[in-house]
Image (tube, rainbow, N blue to C red):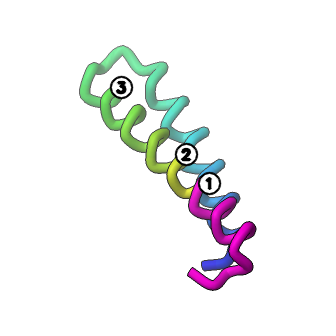
């Protein structure tokens, strides 16, 4: 995936994760935290790709 795609995917995952964390269910909250962290990782991956010109 390209830089922009990774950043968009990361933002969506992060937002969905944050929304799940608002749940009263502890399992859903944990899943939301995991999804939020994955989103942050995807965004970071996109930023790295941007800095390296998609060579990774």
**Residue 43 — which label?**
1
Q: Residue furthest bottom?
A: 55
Q: Is residue 3 above or below residue 1?
A: above
Q: Quadrant of the C terminus?
A: bottom right
Q: Which residue is mark 2?
A: 40
Report the residue marked by disc 3: 29
Is the residue 27 above or below the residue 44 in the image? above
Q: Residue at x 64, y 64 (%)?
A: 48
Residue 47 percent coordinates (x, y)? 68, 60
- Callout 1: helix, strand or loop? helix
| Residue 6 vertical position relative to residue 2 in the rendered view, above or below | above
Question: Is 11 a magenta residue?
Answer: no
> Residue 9, labelled with which disc?
none
Quadrant of the image occupied by residue 1: bottom right
- Could you give the CA–CA distance between mark 1 and mark 2, rounded to whole angstroms? 5 Å
Residue 54: where, in percent of width, then height?
A: 67, 81
Camera-nearest label, 3 or 2: 2
Q: Which residues are magenta?
A: 44-56
Q: Residue furthest top?
A: 24
């Amino acid at each position: 995936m390209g830089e922009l795609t990774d950043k968009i995917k990361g933002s969506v995952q992060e937002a969905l994760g944050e929304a799940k964390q608002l749940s009263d269910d502890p399992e859903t909250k944990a899943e939301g935290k995991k999804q939020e962290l994955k989103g942050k990782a995807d965004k970071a991956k996109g930023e790295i790709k941007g800095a390296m010109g998609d060579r990774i």
